Image: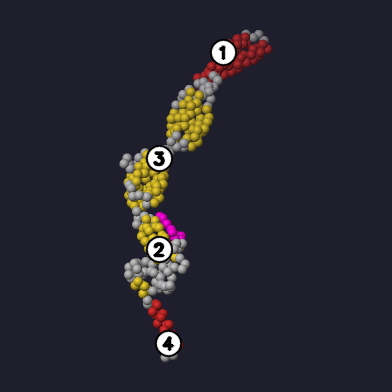
Amino acid sequence: MDRKVVKVLLCILLVITVAWAEKICPNCGTANRDDARFCKKCGARLPEPESRPSLPRLRVTASVEGNSVIITSEPSGATVRIDDIERGKTPLTITELAPGRHEMEVRLAGYQTYYSSFNITARLATLVVTSDPTGADIYLDGVYKGKTTETGLTISRVPFGSHSISARLTGYQEATKLVEVRESGPIGILIKLGTSRGFLSVTTRPSGADVIANGRKLGTAPLVTALAPDRYALTLSKPGYEDWLGYVNIGYGETTAVNQTLSRLPQRQLPILLTGIVLSAGGALSALMGEKSYAAYQQATSTQEAIRLRQETERWDMLRNIGFGAGAGCIGLYFIIRW
């Protein structure tokens, strides 16, 4: 047989042998193709063919503690990949891994690549959440868990690690607490809720002033009322006194006190009454003078005298009307104005 033909046949045989070679899965024992990287049955990573048996083996140790793994190698400085993600170089501690199976690959130049896997077992804890006041809605990492009672709310099967616990109650400010769970418990957690309203206390001297905040009447002093936290324009108003204007800041759960003496306005009631009496008296006097002029008008002996007396009578009548009208108006104001 021709030597060239023999060489071709040998090459074909070598290719067929490689193609049909088997690689045994160390996890489940399934036979896989020699060029396969993962087991066709369980999905575990298969060992690489030892094409260079002369390379020394890398000694690797993986110690699992909770949801963390500590990886060391001899020699150190090897690159570590977990689930095809590079994590650093040995010695290396990787924390907060998710529960389950993880594939590990450790490489160092001049050494055979090390392949292995490890399992993270979920570690669970029990939390007992109480709130002040009770009856608050509790959320763990944004998920509703129930309401607190006098004995607390029990939350089971909480994974180790960092968690956010929020408490919500109508009339109170939402409170959130960050908790680091490192033991199985039960772990007691107290959340205090601050009131979502503040209080305004108003007293005036004299009492009875209207209390107006941002244009809305709240009542009359003395007064204690709840308000939403904010800045308010406050007015204290009482007839006969100057209005008091100011600003108050209402904070969560705080009481803001306002104690104010009002300044009295000048007394206007009596002068108005006196003015009304004087005007009315003037009207009465004008009426008498008008009657006198009218009587003289009736007894006039000449035309000129009659014209003069008639005009005089009309003037006194006009003054009478003005005096009585203005006097009545002032006396009416006396009963309307209270100060």
Which label sits in the foreground, 2 or 1?
2
Q: CA distance from mark 1 to mark 3?
A: 73 Å
Q: Are marks 4 and 3 in contact (CB under 8 Å)?
A: no
Q: Which residue is mark 3?
A: 193
Q: Is residue 91 above or below residue 141?
A: below
| Label 4: which secondary element | helix
Q: Nearer the viewer, residue 86 or 158?
A: 86
| Label 2: which secondary element | strand
Count of labels shown?
Answer: 4
Residue interval drawn in magenta? 87-96
Residue found 47% across the figure and 67% down from its top = 109
Residue found 58% across the figure and 18% down from its top = 322
Q: Main secondary structure of the magenta part?
A: strand
Q: Which mark is residue 281?
A: 1
Amino acid type at circle 3 is Leu
Q: Which residue is mark 4?
A: 6
Q: CA distance from mark 2 to mark 1?
A: 121 Å
The quadrant of the rendering that contains the N terminus is: bottom left
Q: Which mark is residue 111?
A: none
Q: Nearer the viewer, residue 48 or 257?
A: 48
Q: Please rate how many residues cluster around mark 1, counting C-alpha atoms within 10 Å: few if below 14, some from 14 to 19, many from 20.
A: some
